Image: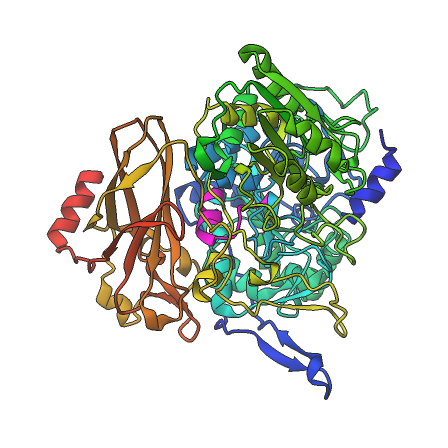
């Protein structure tokens, strides 16, 4: 095991609202290259408001406690305890006289980091690939149980930054390239985790879409793009009652995220009405007074910028007493919101010292979570190609597994710190990326082990060859077998050597370990070649995807501890694959709308321009009429489905907000304006039936896209609904979608509000973003009379 010092070294690397306006350019000198955006100021920091009854109750309790506290104690609620300052990665000290036991703040997001006897869950990107809200919530519930039983108050997750570019190193921690999918997955995860009494800390707010220069780069994003593409998952987090939000390392339009008053005061606590607290990414705080006034509540893990400095700032008037009262109330109300004031377990581990026999109680929190891990693993497999029904395997006479990714890691699954490993070192199945978003594997079932059990059961002659580079021998051995399965991988993670060089990001989109040549060698010698890909994101497959002997391709992602069993379930037909791509796989690298610039030595700070605007992932491919290799939402099945025509109806609303009031701009734009009930309640219902035309039962992921009126500047279509349904052979299942005013709105920069464009909306329902099976024009919203509205409300009351 690594020494404590080496461990730490590696870890280091790793109110009244002002009018919101887009960022402006600021010229630092006469050189046009030295023109940088400015983020407009929004002060003061809004006071906390209750956005629902749960928050109202929690805030009431918190305010009673805050009234009893000294100034030093109030500031202490937002001041980290140092590094290492306790048993967890982040610690807030207790205040015994009000019964506050302090906070243990700890990484996620796929499992409890650096602690034993925990589960290694599938990564976020695999959970998203299921397109199944119930599975995502179940994953969150299981994670919540493990954090609670380890005594952790705050789960540093979910990670909900979008896949703006496939080169970004931490994409696997998140939900892919679509804001709606990311928002739904974020919502379900938070509801699941917090149902177990653990606080969520959704991250990273905002525009933290690369590792390269993440600690100094400025992400420059226009106002409309920010609201329509990158903000929606965080909006859903607020609707899910997330206890806290993490401010990111980077700058936003020139201003540090941890002290950006536009995004923290103006958008998060203002427009979204977020009532919880904002903490910084670890060591990401850049100031005290400026950060506090801009809306940061808790710099972690070190509180040097806060503590006595904020106490002195209150005394000299540079920070208002009300800001500190608000800070303290936000932290305590989140504690009450999740019920941590009653019966919460004590911390039973020491993340900094594995030899601490006093605090390391080795509490086993795994339960039977392997079941949901295996289920999500199987459900997240995306079948990309399946000629001649090669899959599922039907007791082939002989089978060979080729490639190091098929086998176990030679040094065990936990040998490398935070799973960080270079291409030259890493062999064995890829089941997790690297960085702070990792955890220990309690065990790791590799594909070879799982397939061997099936081979024994079904009397299959099984061989394997785990050398990635001896193509001649791989081809010779493959030629002797009925079926050959080639395993590929591609890894990435968080920047671990400081963040200047961004070695967490992917230098290219190629398969590791000579993967392309290995597939070609095997396919040239075996007419029944199957490719299995364990990868953090898209890889280049153009050289082999159309090879006539490559009969099937399974996209497996990174699935955690049950990776081998989940694969075997799909390969042998125990599970009908239903996973869908949560991002686009292009034919050429240049087809992706954004890249990571590795020469970002702009003076005086590097800049990354989100110049693609709204055209992220499939939106770009559709808008530019580029044919991808595999589109967003794509995935095959062992059966086939047909879709009926769409029928629809408008729904009664609980609010009295009418269309003409919206059009006449009578809707307020004050604090919480973007989470108002009238904006998000269902107004339209979209229905259709799906029939299983094949002989095998299975799940179908039905996707609803909306095409906005042509003159409103939107991409050709946007995902606005999905349902994963199970259908028996020959039977029909009803699919139901609901749309809100928000779903059909765009962000108007001039009026700073959500507006529904005038014109025709088209409903597009299909099996992927390009496989549209049923279309209709959205009917106009029907206005309900007052008596109908009153009848509805009285019945529900």
Q: Residue at x 56, y 27 (%)?
A: 567
Residue 57 at x, y percent in the picture: 44, 41
Q: Is there any visible trace of residue 20 in the rendered image?
A: yes
Near-viewer residue (699 or 15): 699
Q: Nearer the viewer, residue 553 or 111?
A: 553
Residue 458: image location, x then y, percent? 53, 12
Q: Quadrant of residue 134?
A: top left
**For the point 55% across and 48% down, which residue is it?**
160
Q: What x and y, as percent, mark residue 278?
A: 60, 51
Q: Nearer the viewer, residue 66 or 733?
A: 733
Residue 452 higher or lower than 255, as above or below = above
On the image, the x and y values in percent for residue 38 come to: 62, 74
Depicted 47 relative to depicted 238: above or below: below
**Count of residue discs:** 0
Q: Of all residues shown, which one is farthest toward the bottom?
A: 30
Q: Which quarter of the picture shows residue 288?
A: bottom right
Q: Is residue 445 visible?
A: no
Report the span colored magenta.
173-185
Residue 601 horizontal side relative to residue 721, left or right: right
Q: Quadrant of the N terminus?
A: top right
Left or right: 651 with respect to 468?
Answer: left
Q: Residue at x 57, y 25 (%)?
A: 482
Q: Quadrant of the C terminus?
A: top left
- Is 590 within the magenta? no
Colour mapping used in the image: rainbow
In the image, 623 versus 797, the foreground residue is: 623
- Lateral position of residue 446 relative to residue 228, left or right: right
Q: Main secondary structure of the magenta part?
A: helix
């Amino acid at each position: 095991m690594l020494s404590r010092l080496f461990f730490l070294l590696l870890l280091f690397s790793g109110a009244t609202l002002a009018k919101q306006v887009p960022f402006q350019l600021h010229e630092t000198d006469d050189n046009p290259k030295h023109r940088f955006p400015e983020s407009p100021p929004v002060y003061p920091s809004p006071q906390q408001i209750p956005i629902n009854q749960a928050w109202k109750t929690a805030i009431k309790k918190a305010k009673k406690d805050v009234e009893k506290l000294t100034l030093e104690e109030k500031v202490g609620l937002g001041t980290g305890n140092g590094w290492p300052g306790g048993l967890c990665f982040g610690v807030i000290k207790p205040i015994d006289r009000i019964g506050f036991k302090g906070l243990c703040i700890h990484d996620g997001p796929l499992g409890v980091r650096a602690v034993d006897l925990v589960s290694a869950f599938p990564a976020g990107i695999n959970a998203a690939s299921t397109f199944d809200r119930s599975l995502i919530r179940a994953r969150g519930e299981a994670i919540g149980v493990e954090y609670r039983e380890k005594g952790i108050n705050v789960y540093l997750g979910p990670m909900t930054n979008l896949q703006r570019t496939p080169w970004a190193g931490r994409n696997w921690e998140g939900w892919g390239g679509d804001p709606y999918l990311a928002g739904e997955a974020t919502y379900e995860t938070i509801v699941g985790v917090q149902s177990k009494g653990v606080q969520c800390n959704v991250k990273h707010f905002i525009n933290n879409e690369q590792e390269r220069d993440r600690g100094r780069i400025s992400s420059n994003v226009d106002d409309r793009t920010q609201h329509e593409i990158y903000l929606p998952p965080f909006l859903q987090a607020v609707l899910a009652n997330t206890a806290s939000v993490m401010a990111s390392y980077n700058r936003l339009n020139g201003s540090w995220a941890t002290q950006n008053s536009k995004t923290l005061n103006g958008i998060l606590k203002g427009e979204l009405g977020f009532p919880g607290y904002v903490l910084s990414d670890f060591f990401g705080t850049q100031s005290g007074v400026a950060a506090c006034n801009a809306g940061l509540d808790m710099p972690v893990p070190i509180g040097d910028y806060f503590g006595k400095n904020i106490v002195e700032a209150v005394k000299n008037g540079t920070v208002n007493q009300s800001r500190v009262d608000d800070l303290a109330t936000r932290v305590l109300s989140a504690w009450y919101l999740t019920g941590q004031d009653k019966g919460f377990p004590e911390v039973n581990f020491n993340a900094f010292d594995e030899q601490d026999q006093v605090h390391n109680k080795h509490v086993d929190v795994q339960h039977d979570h392997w079941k949901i891990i295996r289920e999500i693993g199987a459900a997240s497999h995306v079948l990309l190609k399946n000629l001649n029904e090669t899959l599922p395997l039907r007791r082939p006479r002989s089978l060979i597994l080729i490639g190091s990714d098929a086998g176990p890691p030679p040094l065990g699954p936990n040998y490398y710190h935070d799973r960080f490993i270079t291409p030259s070192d890493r062999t064995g199945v890829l089941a997790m990326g690297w960085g702070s978003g990792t955890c220990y594997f309690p065990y790791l079932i590799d594909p070879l082990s799982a397939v061997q059990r099936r081979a024994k059961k079904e009397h299959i002659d099984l061989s394997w060859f785990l050398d990635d580079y001896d193509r001649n021998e791989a081809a010779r051995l493959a030629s002797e077998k009925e079926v050959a399965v080639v395993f590929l991988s591609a890894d990435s993670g968080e920047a671990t050597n400081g963040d200047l060089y961004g070695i967490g990001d992917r230098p290219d989109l190629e398969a590791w370990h000579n993967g392309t040549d290995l597939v070609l060698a095997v396919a040239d010698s075996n007419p029944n070649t199957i490719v299995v890909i364990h990868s953090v994101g898209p890889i280049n497959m153009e050289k082999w995807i159309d090879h006539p002997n490559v009969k099937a391709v399974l996209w497996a992602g990174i699935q955690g501890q049950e990776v081998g069993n989940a694969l075997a379930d799909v390969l042998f037909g125990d599970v009908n694959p239903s996973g869908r791509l949560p991002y686009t796989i292009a034919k050429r690298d240049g087809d992706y709308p954004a890249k990571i610039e590795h020469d970002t030595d702009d003076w005086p700070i590097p800049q990354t321009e989100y110049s693609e605007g709204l055209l992220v992932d499939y939106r770009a491919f559709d808008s530019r009429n580029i044919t991808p290799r595999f589109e967003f939402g794509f995935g095959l099945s062992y059966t086939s489905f047909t879709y009926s025509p769409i029928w629809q109806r408008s729904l009664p609303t609980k609010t009295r907000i009418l269309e003409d009031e919206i059009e006449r701009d009578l809707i307020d734009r004050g604090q919480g304006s973007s989470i108002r009930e009238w904006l998000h309640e269902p107004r339209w219902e979209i229905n259709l039936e799906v029939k299983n035309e094949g002989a095998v039962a299975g799940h179908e992921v039905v996707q609803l896209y909306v095409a906005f009126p042509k003159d409103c500047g939107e991409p050709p279509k946007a995902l606005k609904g999905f349902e994963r349904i199970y259908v028996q052979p020959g039977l029909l299942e009803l699919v139901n979608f609901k749309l809100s005013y928000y779903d059909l709105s765009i962000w108007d920069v001039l009026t700073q509000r959500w507006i529904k464009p005038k014109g025709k909306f088209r409903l597009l329902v299909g099996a992927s973003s390009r496989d549209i099976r049923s279309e209709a024009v959205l009917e106009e919203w029907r206005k309900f009379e007052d008596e109908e509205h009153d009848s509805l409300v009285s019945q529900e009351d």
